Amino acid sequence: MASASGVVALVESESARSQSEEAYLRIRERIVSLDMRPGSVVNEGRLREELQIGRTPIREALQRLTRENLVRSVPHRGTFVTDVNITDLARITEVRVVLEAHAASLAAERLSVNDRESLTMLLEVLEEGPSLDQRELMRLDQQIHRQIYRAARNSFLETTLEQYFNLSLRLWYLVLDREVGLREALREHVELLEAILAGNVARADESMRRHVTGFEREIRKVLVER
Amino acid sequence: MASASGVVALVESESARSQSEEAYLRIRERIVSLDMRPGSVVNEGRLREELQIGRTPIREALQRLTRENLVRSVPHRGTFVTDVNITDLARITEVRVVLEAHAASLAAERLSVNDRESLTMLLEVLEEGPSLDQRELMRLDQQIHRQIYRAARNSFLETTLEQYFNLSLRLWYLVLDREVGLREALREHVELLEAILAGNVARADESMRRHVTGFEREIRKVLVER
DNA sequence: CCGACCGATATGCGAGCGATATACCGCCGC
DNA sequence: GCGGCGGTATATCGCTCGCATATCGGTCGG
């Protein structure tokens, strides 16, 4: 018995505890990575057979995604993946700028030994940045942001930022194939991490503001010409 | 049939569309107003009979409240109203300060004619502030904040702030009977509204920061001596 | 006195039923 | 013959209900 559950835990180690959580994470991944395209309909029955998960967990996952603005549900008409538009991009960025900057400030202020170590490692990876392709770059960006959220030591801030980050991440996926000028984000990241590691609160705040607004500018460029 | 549903719609006009929503709002109200005390167990069956609502809607409401940190659910042990402590107060305030201030800035920047009118009305009510008791004061504070959220014209920011506001509101209820020095919040409000109405972004930002941190200071005073 | 079993309790999940809103189609009026 | 309208059909959803499962506390046996 114990060994069986041990194996299960091992197999599903990454994904989930409850089926609800599992469904949520997998559907979210699909939406963020554009595997389910913006504006397309979400077919509950189809998800059920594809994920091999019952109706209740799927339903709960969709409700959660609705609250996070990744899907939109119209009572007896259907559920749709949220569309992408420039207005939302601007609104999301508006919030992200102040929250991310604040997180960076707090991280600079409260940096623990462990967090310092993690950020230092990320900085080292950044140094060899030019050898990375867009997907690796994106993955690295994720790690950096999430590590900063953790380092800010505020669980409320962390979960809120996680939500907004996923919304932004989908936008990045949208422009992934057009060689968009997000490589200069590398320099921004270096500056940002150095500021945090130096405990320079004001500069960390400032750097993160530039980074997030720069991100928006680049995404917007590609988005307007669609 | 049509008339019956019409009557129902009339009776429940304010509260809900779906039973899920109804359950959510009513349970949230109970928690925020301390009718369900922090740390107490949430009995699903009891809620079911008290609210005359089925199991699924209650369950969905509780999940939503879990996401908003108003209840905490431990897998097969029970669901509890989230406890209150000074650390959380500090963390919540940390986020609120930057978000509320940003909302105030945006409101000052984007104020529409209608919003201007609403805020002007609230300002007039404020002028006769001293005649208000604590509960009315609290209600007025709610209206002011929510109106500012709306005036900021950013739906993402609005929903996020709504969540944090409810968390804070519960803390206010906690100290409601001790005549706590939140009356000076009146002056802060006046200054805040005037700044927004004048379109003074920097001052709106500044005023809101003072207001939220002042709020925290007062709550904290009462909280530490418990 | 300690450990293991067992019942109580509460949640997680699945399937079906009734309600509802839309879409389509046929009919009526112009 | 064409356009507007009402009725029916269908798909989806919200909710109820019941079973499976996991954890805890108490008790019995060693």
Image: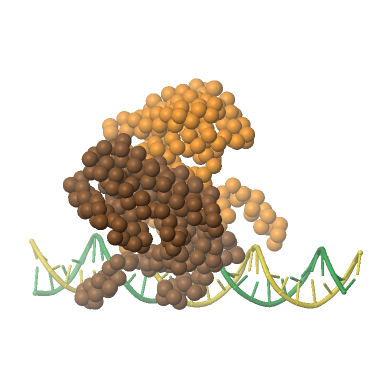
Chain colours: A brown, B orange, C yellow, D green
Q: Who's the residue at 36% across and 54% down the image? A: A183
Q: Who's the residue at 34% across and 39% down the image? A: A205
* Relative depth, front residue between A180 and A210: A180
Residue D26, quarter of the rendered image:
bottom left
Q: Image height check: is C22 above or below B200?
A: below
Q: Image height check: is A49 above or below B22?
A: below
Image location (x, y in percent) of residue B118:
59, 33
* Relative depth, front residue between B140 and B133: B140
* Relative depth, front residue between C28 and A222: A222
Q: Who's the residue at 49% across and 47% down the image? A: A90
Instruction: Give the quarter of the figure containing the N terminus of chain B.
Output: bottom right
Q: Image height check: is A46 above or below B169?
A: below
Q: Is residue B29 left or right of residue B116?
A: left
Image location (x, y in percent) of residue B58:
46, 58
Q: Is residue B5 left or right of residue A71?
A: right
Image location (x, y in percent) of residue A163:
41, 53
Instruction: Give the quarter of the figure containing the C terminus of chain B.
Output: top left
Q: Image height check: is C19 above or below A216?
A: below
Image location (x, y in percent) of residue B41:
35, 52
Residue A206, quarter of the rendered image:
top left
Q: Can residue B77 be seen in this view?
A: no
Q: Who's the residue at 51% across and 55% down the image? A: A223
Q: Is residue B124 visible?
A: yes
Label tally: 0
Q: Is residue D13 left or right of residue D10?
A: left
